[in-house]
Amino acid sequence: MTQFDFIKDIARFGLENDQEKLKFSLQEMIDHARKTKKTNLAIQLQSILKEAIRVHSTGSASKVSSGIRFDKPSQNKVDDLILEQVTSDYRISDLICKPRIKESLNHFILEHRKKSLLEALDLPIAHKILFHGPSGCGKTLASYIIAGELEKMLMVVNLGAIVSSKLGETSKNLAKVFKMAAAGDCILFLDEFDSLGKVRDYSQDHGEMKRVVNTILQLFDYLPQSTIVIAATNQVGMLDDALIRRFDTQIGFELPGEDEIMALIDLTLKKGVFSVGSKRELKKIIQHAKGLSFYSIQKTLITAMKRSLYQLNTDLIPAQVTIDMNIWGSLVDDEKDSQNHKV
Ligand SMILES: Nc1ncnc2c1ncn2[C@@H]1O[C@H](COP(=O)(O)OP(=O)(O)O)[C@@H](O)[C@H]1O
Ligand SMILES: [Mg+2]
């Protein structure tokens, strides 16, 4: 059967309200998508199916005959708390970092590949990980990599919104998103985790901060070991010590050194049509770029690639483009200047 046959079956069974056949066809389509390497489609469909089965099994008796419900009006409020739910194609090879960071990440991923084995032997599974370090050094990227490697959906939580807009409701809302992630077998990604520290600024109620930290501690304790929670912050100093201690693994990301900058350049050029100018010029740019984040350096390189391409003055796809090192050098200088002004 082709994907179109599955879609036709699903449409028919859905309209006929034949739930069993609908679920069966959907599962077949998921298996087919996996086999044909449409991993993202498979993960997203699996998540829809799981959530529908969960809602259905916990729903009231009157809902049983009405078929699977894909829209859940009662959950709209929770949706505001979630920035996005994504699948990812990123792999560990997309990250450039010191070997010990990669090792920690690989170990964490392995825990979940070997989950059944660990469970069978009654061994604990590390499932709470904290990423800290300067902005633009790979914290969000590493989260996408964990999701990509484990083929799980990443639920990105709008922690800022949870903390600022629903005063007094922070704890309740946090509990909701934790529950949703566990039920949908998603990875919970709490970006800008330091926002939790800001409850202090928003709330007149000084007990609120303590309550929120306590809620998180409790949610962490009760979260099933198979649910991964990733927290990321570039202000680790803002976090409560008790909170930091609760993570199974902590990874500190750093600004790139010369070796990492070189690796980033190779990764960005990906053996394509672009190549760098002389070794001496390259060395000079790398020296200049020190102190900038991976993100900023990559940004200057991509801009330099494009401008070097425009200089060729052609609409034909060139076989080879040498990057104009003067352009790149001055972009790096500009970037450094703008960073210095920010500080
Ligand atoms: N360590 C890294 N290795 C490779 N690319 C990186 C790295 N850090 C950042 N980048 C590039 O910069 C982009 C933004 O980085 P991101 O992970 O969002 O940074 P952070 O979350 O730490 O602020 C990434 O999508 C990637 O293109
Ligand atoms: Mg980030």
Image (tube, grey):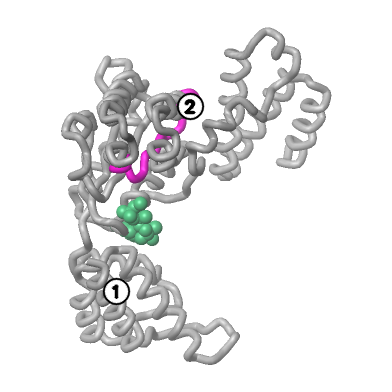
Relative to the observer, which residue lies in front, 203 or 198?
Answer: 203
Is 275 placed left or right of 56 in the picture?
A: left
Image quarter of residue 29: top right
Q: Which residue is mark 1?
A: 338
Q: Which residues are magenta?
A: 180-195
Q: Quadrant of residue 332?
A: bottom left
Disc with the residue nearer the chain's start (2 vs 1): 2
Left or right, 108 with respect to 244, comes to right
Return the residue nearer the eye: 57 or 281. 57
Determine whether, in the image, residue 132 is placed left or right of residue 155: left
Q: Residue 187 colored magenta?
A: yes
Residue under label 2, please give it: 180
- When asked about the image quadrant of residue 231, the answer is top left
Q: Which mark is residue 149?
A: none
Could you say where residue 310 lies in the image, as x and y percent from the top left?
Answer: 50, 86
Does the rendering let one see residue 194? yes
The amino acid type found where label 2 is placed reads Met
Q: CA distance from mark 2 to mark 1?
A: 41 Å
